[in-house]
Image (cartoon, grey):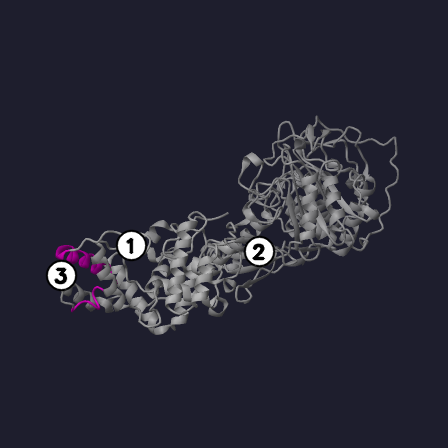
Amino acid sequence: MESHQLPISNPADDESPDDESPRRPRTGPLRLARFGLVFLSTSVVSGVLLAGMSLPLIGGVGLTAKRTAESFDDISGDFKTPPLTQATQIFDAKGGQIAKVYARDRTILTADQMSPLMRHAQVDIEDARFYEHGAIDLKGILRALGKNAESGTNSQGASTLTQQYVKNVNVENAGDDKEAVAEAQRKTLGRKIQELKIAIKLDKDLPKDQILTNYLNITYYGNGAYGVQAASQRYFSKDNKDLTVAEAATLAGLVQNPSQYDPKLHPTAAQKRRDTVIDKMLENKHITADQAKEAKAAPLGLRYKEPQNGCITAKPGMGFFCDYVRHVVKQDPVFGKTAEERAKLWNTGGLNIYTTLDPDKQAAAQSAVSGDVKVTDTVSAAATMIEPGTGKILAMAQTRPYGLDGTKNQTVVNLNVDAAMGGGNGFQPGSNFKPIVAAAALEAGLPPTQQYDAPNKLEYPNMKTCEGTWRNDARPKAVVPNESASEKGPYQLKEAMAKSINTYFVQMEKEIGLCAVKQMVNKFGITTKASGKPLEEVPSIGLGTQEMSPLTMANVYATFAANGTHCTPLALSRITTVDGKDVPIPAAQCDKAFSEDTARAINTILNGVTVDGTGASIKMDGNRQIAGKTGTSDHKRAAWFSGYTPQLATSVWLGGPAGGVEMRDITINGKRYDEVFGYNGPGPIWGDAMNEALRGAPMQSLPMADIPDAPKPDPNATTGTGTPPATTATR
């Protein structure tokens, strides 16, 4: 989002146009003296160069000047040019620009990257004797004093280009703080003297060419363009080095008053000002008469490019990932020890940020979430893709577009991520979470053929936790039901996962203890809910009642696909400064969450879900082998499908953006649903996204385990009974 911009100080602060605004002269001894006093009191050099000048009616000025000169040593001469804020560019994995973000739109150039015409034009119109005088131009001061007296105004100033540069640096340091900017621009004798001292020091320490280069990089040219490169792109859609005489003169003329000479709003005034600059360039012999004639005959020739700032201007569908990158830079300690340091890095800009986003997979995900759900529907969809074994985020898409216009169903809430990273409070993943319980059980030593009686309904049993015991003390006691009355055991793990049997996984939690489940959840990098609140160590955790984001769930399934290797999500591949220096970035941290034996068993179990379980209707082209799990939350307020191949893991969520839409008797994209489940809502979106994302990719098989099918149940066996159903996350 674009920040409020305050223009850098321009010469208009000290002088106003003389060619365009003639006034009738008003002279006389008293008026001459008065304008002399006004000028001297505001001139930077009032106490230094004119202390001994004998002007009859201003004898008091000599004493003031003397004291001012004597106090010079009390003013610090330490002045360091701050790092200028520049635009930061964010790129996808193939080098395409995602967005350009900045506090101030500026690209710093070296002298040899600038047009010589631009350099001549700026000097000729602002400070033609720049290369002849020091930090102060005495001849210019006397000329301005005379013209002001003749015209009866204080319209002519005598600030040199070096002095203007000093003032601009002070304004730049003030940032977007209005009070600080006003203070930096305040016309007081003390501030003028301070600026003068710095200017004198700079004139001694820096070559004139470097001062000019710095000036051209810091100066404001209107319409949000800071520095000559941004200005060249804004008004003419070209690099500064490629400007014509007429174009360079147009830009140089803007500096005195960017609003008055805005070529977009005031083309006549801008062209007249441009021609004045051209005349100055001819007068100073930086162009020939023929060049001047040709330039003045040319139209303004604008090719104006509107400011493009922030993630709101990102390529379609990429705004949310752009915003996620912003949060990464502002929150990861690798970019600064404090929030202030990280914010400064982002706001100062001048970075080239290369990301992991694959534009082809992003397009596939965006097409799927937009094609199967309308932005005007009461529900929305979100999908995240992760590369197994690296943690690279390859796609991040959602139905509703990134933006601030609610009437167009836009939002800046990234439904794919946790609240701390620009998202909401997440959504219950339902049975999407059950494979984590299975992984914990297998790691605890239970066999993949583990069997429980899994009644149709079950009172939550008391369970061991990491710090004690969870007890079902509710009255009446809390009960977990299966989805339908026909679902009752006994079941083994493979079938229980395929049919998403709630009571089975509660009994599994009872056997291994909630501490083992929580520890496995932590190994997947999950330490809080999406809201940032602590995880609750309760039996319903394994049924997915604690809100998660699609990014979190995609990373869980990427861990399964990577044979048990969990990697932290990674959005950045490289960052450089504009001069090519590398900036340290966070590396993916990869650790073994569970054994390869467990991984093979989970692959086999989750593949079964897509073969003859709740996800059997979800297929990929060419019969590509997949593994995954459906999930549906309480009251059908969220539905999920998360799954993977060896190359790619994707999680898709479907529901109300605020979590309050019950997906019963609902129309989505023109299709009516009695009820939405993981297989019929997000499942087809997942299939569309994965088919397109992996089009042309080699077929790869998942490492599998040999898990025998369970024997057919004895029809005479009895099962447990329970009390009336209670709400819980289900398939």
Badge 1: how crowded within 10 Å, few (<14), some, or many (20+)?
few
Does residue 718 lie above or below 226 as drawn? above
Is residue 51 rendered magenta in the image?
A: yes
Residue 64 in view here: yes
Decide if residue 41 is on the left or right side of residue 352: left
Disc 1 marks a residue whose amino acid type is Arg
Is residue 384 rendered magenta in the image?
A: no
Residue closest to the eye, 51 or 312: 51
Position in image of residue 63 (x %, y %): 14, 65
Mark 2 or mark 1, earlier in chain:
2
Badge 2: how crowded within 10 Å, few (<14), some, or many (20+)?
many
Badge 3: how crowded within 10 Å, few (<14), some, or many (20+)?
some
Q: Give the labeled residue for mark 3.
A: 58
Q: Give the labeled residue for mark 1.
A: 186
SS for callout 3: loop
Q: Which mark is residue 90?
A: 2
Decide if residue 345 is on the left or right side of residue 455: left
Tell me which segment is drawn in magenta: 28-52
Disc 1/disc 3 C-alpha distance (Å): 24 Å
Residue closest to the eye, 13 or 261: 261
Position in image of residue 255 (x %, y %): 39, 57
* Foreground tag (2 vs 1): 1
**Residue positioned 34% across, 62% down in the render:** 164
Disc 2 marks a residue whose amino acid type is Ile
- How many discs mark residues in the rendered view? 3
Disc 3 marks a residue whose amino acid type is Ile
Residue closest to the eye, 432 or 150: 150
SS for callout 1: loop
Q: Marks 2 and 1: CB-CB under 8 Å?
A: no
Q: Quadrant of residue 25?
A: bottom left
**Residue positioned 38% across, 56% down in the render:** 8
Residue 527 in view here: no
